[in-house]
Image (cartoon, rainbow, N blue to C red):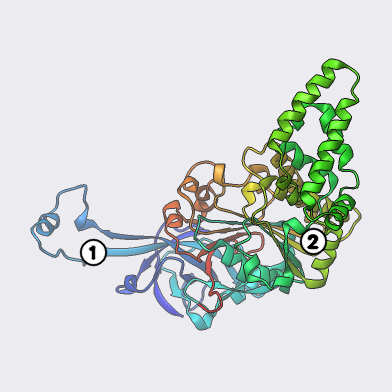
């Protein structure tokens, strides 16, 4: 390490300002990690690890708010003097370095204390990891590929959020950093690939299951039909007819695949006949007429092709057993209707929740791509059910080794995750944010500005860069990390 400057006045126990030595402004940059020898090089009170943020350059001769001779000289093309230029950075203290690891600093950081820039061979993350049960990831601190980032294994089931606008590298980061990390921790990984294009193509064919192959539970299928038929035409008789027909649904689906060349059309006609027969048996004329009107509205909208998304034959139990055998699976949801995707999620969630209620430790990481589709900010209908189920899974999952990893383009509002769900996420990765997240309650600025990270900086992050914050980060201060995808 090499000395780059000294502490300025006004330092506290957690905040300080570094004045750079002459020429250091050309090589020292924000997010560099530094070491403060508090009190002097020879007999320091302690050694404090910190990160540089909020750079500032000052030249009192060049104040744009007042008229000075140097400003006039500049206006006429001259080059003003730089003898009074001062360059500085804010230092966010990570903590005091001890034999047990990083501890909070309680002593005042003394002005004039020397500050050293940590170089590749110094690897400060070894200090950060002390005292924690860590797993070393393939991500590294920006600018230092040899400084691999440790994750605290203890907090893996405390749930994760990955946020960033389109193209910032969320899917690649999840695929090449988080999934291998979860596997090294002994977790099985189940990926819900909403579009079928982000994860499924990167896995072997035997580790990808299409949503249309999965059998949903009858309650989820009923919710699916409820959405497809506008609440069964608001007629309780027809709702009961659908409910009755769905009893033993998987067996009926298998029979249709065996007996017919067009199983969806075969099932559709049986369903239609069942409803029609039930309506004709209604004794009261006015009730029968109301049911017939609802019947016509429903079957003008419902088509045989609408049945395919719920005609899978692989049960959720078989899916879970397949996950245990292979360690990682992706559910390709591409091409399926939104109601079918959410219906599947409900069926899967209920199964996982029932297993946890029996006392089973799952050891599963459930990666939910496009999380706002399951838990939007104003959840209604079937989305209200999926949102509530995510909250229930998160609460019980902390004790039963279930990790939820939610991926979203934004943090709040229409592009973000429901606030009640977001409160259950304790580790966060912030990539390049959407402008909607740049300000206001719950946005990225509110999360990171206490650590000296501005919204304008987050808006300009390069793809593949993320601020790592929260429980799984052994550093109490968010760090800027990145990664190198294979073959790039």
Q: Position of residue 24 (x, y in %)?
A: 34, 73
Residue 216 seen in the figure? yes
Residue 199, quarter of the rendered image: bottom right
Q: Tally the numbered discs.
A: 2
**Is residue 460 depicted above or below 424 in this figure?**
below
Q: Nearer the viewer, residue 204 or 163?
A: 204
Q: Position of residue 158 (x, y in %)?
A: 72, 57
Under circle 1, the secondary element is loop
| Neighbour tally class for label 1: few under 14, some 14-19, many 20 plus, Cα within 10 Å | few
| Neighbour tally class for label 2: few under 14, some 14-19, many 20 plus, Cα within 10 Å | many
Q: Which mark is residue 427?
A: none
Residue for badge 1: 84
Query: Which residue is at 78% across, 72% downward?
Result: 326
Query: Which residue is at 68% across, 56% downward?
Result: 333
Task: Single out the residue that lies furthest toward the bottom.
Answer: 121
In primary-sequence order, the first of circles 1 and 2 is 1
Q: Position of residue 205 (x, y in %)?
A: 70, 71
**Is residue 1 depicted above or below 48 in this figure?**
below
Under circle 2, the secondary element is loop
Q: Which mark is residue 401?
A: 2
Q: Nearer the viewer, residue 404 or 84?
A: 404
Q: CA distance from mark 1 to mark 2?
A: 58 Å
Callout in the foreground (1, 2): 2
Q: Nearer the viewer, residue 15 or 285?
A: 285
Give the left or right position of residue 80, taking residue 229 as reference. Answer: left
Residue 100 seen in the figure? no
Give the left or right position of residue 185, taking residue 258 as reference. Answer: left
């Amino acid at each position: 390490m090499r000395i780059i400057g000294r502490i300025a006045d006004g330092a506290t126990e957690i905040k300080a300002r570094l004045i750079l030595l002459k020429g250091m402004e050309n090589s020292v940059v924000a997010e560099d990690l530094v070491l403060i020898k508090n009190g002097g090089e020879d007999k320091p009170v302690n050694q404090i690890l910190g990160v540089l943020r909020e750079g500032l350059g000052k030249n009192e001769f060049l104040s744009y708010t007042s008229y000075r001779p140097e400003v006039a000289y500049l206006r006429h093309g001259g080059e003003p003097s730089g003898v009074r230029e001062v360059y500085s950075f804010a230092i966010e203290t990570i903590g005091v370095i001890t034999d047990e690891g990083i501890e909070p600093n309680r002593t005042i950081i003394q002005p004039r204390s020397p500050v050293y820039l940590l170089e590749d061979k110094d690897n400060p993350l070894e200090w950060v990891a002390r005292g924690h049960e860590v797993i070393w990831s393939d991500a590294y601190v920006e600018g230092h590929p040899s400084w691999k980032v440790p994750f605290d294994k203890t907090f893996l089931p405390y749930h994760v959020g990955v946020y960033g606008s389109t193209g910032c590298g969320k899917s690649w980061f999840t695929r090449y950093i988080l999934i291998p990390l979860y596997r090294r921790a002994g977790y099985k990984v189940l990926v819900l690939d909403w579009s079928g294009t982000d994860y499924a193509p990167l896995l072997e064919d035997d580790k990808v299951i299409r949503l249309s192959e999965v059998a949903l539970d009858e309650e989820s299928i009923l919710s699916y039909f409820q959405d497809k038929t506008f609440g069964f035409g608001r007629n309780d008789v027809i709702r009961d007819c659908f409910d009755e027909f769905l009893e033993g649904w998987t067996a009926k689906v298998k029979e249709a695949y065996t007996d017919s060349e067009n199983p969806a059309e075969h099932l559709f006609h049986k369903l239609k006949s069942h409803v029609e027969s039930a309506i004709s048996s209604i004794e009261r004329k006015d009730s029968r007429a109301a049911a017939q009107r609802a019947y016509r509205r429903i079957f003008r909208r419902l088509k045989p092709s609408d049945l395919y998304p719920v005609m899978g034959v692989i049960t959720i139990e078989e899916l879970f057993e397949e996950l245990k055998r292979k360690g990682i699976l992706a559910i390709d949801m591409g091409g399926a209707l939104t109601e079918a995707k959410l219906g599947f999620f409900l069926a899967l969630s209920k199964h996982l929740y029932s297993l946890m209620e029996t006392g089973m430790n799952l050891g599963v990481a459930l990666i939910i791509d496009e999380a706002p589709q399951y838990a939007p900010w104003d959840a209604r209908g079937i989305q209200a059910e999926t949102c509530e189920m995510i909250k229930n899974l998160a609460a019980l999952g902390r004790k039963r080794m279930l990790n939820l990893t939610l991926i979203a383009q934004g943090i709040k509002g229409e592009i973000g995750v429901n606030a009640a769900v977001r409160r259950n996420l304790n580790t966060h990765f912030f990539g390049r944010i959407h402008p909607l997240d740049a300000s206001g309650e719950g946005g990225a600025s509110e999360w990171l500005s206490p650590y000296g990270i501005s919204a304008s900086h987050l808006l300009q992050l390069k793809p593949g860069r993320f601020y790592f914050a929260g429980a799984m980060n052994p550093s109490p201060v968010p760090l800027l990390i990145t990664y190198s995808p294979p073959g790039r």
